[in-house]
Image: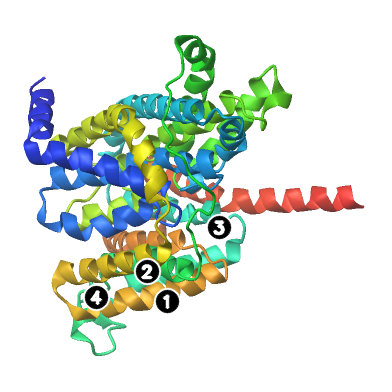
Amino acid sequence: MSELLAVLLTISQPLNAFVLVAGVILGLLSGATPGVSGTMMVVLLIPLTYSLSPETAFLLLCAVYCSSVFSGSISAILFRTPGAPEAVATTLDGYPMAQQGKAPLALGISVFSSALGGLIGTILLIFVAPLLAKVALKFGPPEYFALAMLGLSVITVLGANNLIKALLAAGFGLFLATVGIDAMTGVARFTFGLSGLMSGIDFIPVLIGLFAVSEVLRRVMDDLTVKERIYRVKSQLPSLGLIKRLSTTIVRSSLIGTAIGILPGIGATTASMVSYSEAVRWSKDKDKFGTGIPEGIAAPESANNAAANGAMVPLLALGIPGSATTAVILGAFILHGIKPGPLMFTEQTHLVYTIFAGLFLCNFLILFIAKPFITVFSNIIRIPYAVLGPIILLLCIVGSFAIRNNLLDVWLTMIFGVVGYVMEKYNFPLAPVILGLVLGGLAEQEMRRSLVISGGDWSVFFHSPISAVLLVAAAVSVVFPIISGLINKHKQNNAAA
C-alpha cells in the first residue's frame, strides 16, 4: 500500500504529469505521421532524458511508446497509409469503412479497442513480470550468459525473411560491442588510436544513426504529402451495442497480443496479423472481412497495443528487449545506469511500479486526447517531409552531441546513418545490430566469468537447471525457424511438382 501511495505521489508531481501528457501527444503524432515512427521518436528523446530523473525519463519514453502503437491506425484508416507497421492489418477493414463514409466510427473503434487492449496488456504485465523476476533472482554468471544467448537467438525471428543477412547484421553488432578497453584484461581493442573509443562505442550514436538518420536519408527523396483533399475528421466512440458485439473479439485479441508480445523479437505487427486471422477464423461472417467491418479493426488494434505492453515483460524481468522499441528503451536504461533484469524488482521497485502506473494511465489518456488530436492531425499530415526531415536531422545531431559533448559521437551518428541506409537498401535488418551491441558485451563478460569460476570447464553452463533450460530454448529458437523454412520450401516444391 505504501508503494502504491509513493507511485501516485510521483506521478502526481507537476513535471511528471506534464511529461506523461506530452509523451502521449508526441507518441500520437509520431505514430500517425508516415516516416516518423514511435521508435524514431523514442530515439530522439533519449538524449533529452539524460538530465531527467529515471522516473520522469521512463514515464516520457513509455508514454511515447504506448501511444505511438495506437496512432498508426489513424493514417491507416484515413489514407490507407499506416503510420506504423503495427497498423498494417488495420488498413484491411479500416480504409474500406472510411470509403463508406464511416471514418468517425472506424476511428472510434480503433481508439476504444486500442485503449482496452492496452489496459488488459498492462494488467497482465503487472502480474506476469514479477513472477519472472522471482525466478530470475537465482541468476549467476552462467545464467546471465544463457539469458544473453536466448536474447541473441531472437535474431532468427527478426531475420526470418533472410537469415544470412540477419546473422551478418548481428555479427556486426557483436563486433561493435568489442570496441574499447577489455573489462577483463584492460587491453584496448579496435580503438585505432582514438582516445574517444577507449570507453567503447556509445549506444546512443549507433541508435540515432541506424534508426533516425538512415530513415531521413531514405525518405528525403519521397514526397510524403498526402495528395488527396482532407476534410476535418472527428472520431465517434462505438455504441454500447457495438461494444458488446466486439467484446469477445477485443478480449481474445488482447490475450493473443500479450502472449505474442512477451515472446522476445516477435513484435506487435505479428500480434496484429495473428489476431486478425483468428478473428476471421472465429467469425460467422468470414466473407465480410476486408470489406469494412468493426471486428476487422478491433482485432488488430487491441492486439498490437496489448503486445506493446507484453513486450515490456521480458525487458523488465529478464533484460531482453521484446521489440525494436523496447531495445531502444533498454539503451535508455543503460544510459541512466540501470540494468533491467532479475534484480530490478528489488533494487528499483519504485521505478518499476511507476512505469506500470504510467502505462496504465497512458491508455486512459489515449481515450481523451485521441479525439481532438484526430481533428488536428488532418492538417499536420500535409507537412512535406522536405520540411520535417531537416528538423529530425538537426535533433539527431544535437542529441548525439549532448550526451558526452563529444564531436566524435556526431561523426559516429552520421557514419551509422549511412550504414543504416545502405543496410536497409540491401534488406539487412537493423534490429539484430542493436541486439548484438546491447547483449554482446553481456554475453562475452558473463561467459568469461563463468569459465574463470569453473577453471575452463564448459559444462558449467549446464550445471544449473535455469542455465540449461535457457540454452536449450535458445538452440530451439535458432533451429526451429530454419527447419520450418526447409519444410515449407519442400512442401512448395512438392505442390509445384
Under tag 3, what secondary structure? loop
Left or right, 175 with reference to 9: right
The numbered mark, 1 or 2, whose residue comes first in the sequence reads: 2
Under tag 4, what secondary structure? helix
User: What is the C-alpha distance between the residues marked 4 and 1?
Assistant: 14 Å
Under tag 1, what secondary structure? helix
Instruction: Give the x, y percent position of residue 380.
Output: 37, 50
Q: Is residue 76 above or below residue 433?
A: above
Q: Is residue 345 above or below residue 181?
A: above
The amino acid type, in three-letter code, at marker 3 is Gly
The numbered mark, 2 or 4, whose residue comes first in the sequence reads: 2
Q: Which residue is mark 3?
A: 159
**Dots 3 and 2: beta carbons under 8 Å?**
no
Q: Residues within 10 Å of mark 1 (few under 14, many from 20)?
A: some
Residue 409 badge: 4
Which sits in the foreground, 356 or 371? 371
- Which residue shows up at 48% across the image and 59% down it? 224
**Dots 1 and 3: beta carbons under 8 Å?**
no
Q: Which residue is mark 2?
A: 213
The amino acid type, in three-letter code, at marker 1 is Val
**Looking at the figure, which quarter contains the N terminus?**
top left
User: What is the C-alpha distance between the residues marked 1 and 3?
Assistant: 21 Å
The amino acid type, in three-letter code, at marker 2 is Val
Closer mark to the observer between disc 2 and disc 4: 2
The numbered mark, 3 or 2, whose residue comes first in the sequence reads: 3
Q: Residues within 10 Å of mark 3 (few under 14, many from 20)?
A: many
Which sits in the foreground, 86 or 449? 86
**Residue 323 visible in rendering:** yes
User: What is the C-alpha distance between the residues marked 3 and 2?
Assistant: 22 Å
Residue 418 badge: 1
Instruction: Give the x, y percent position of residue 482.
Output: 64, 54
Q: Residues within 10 Å of mark 2 (few under 14, many from 20)?
A: many
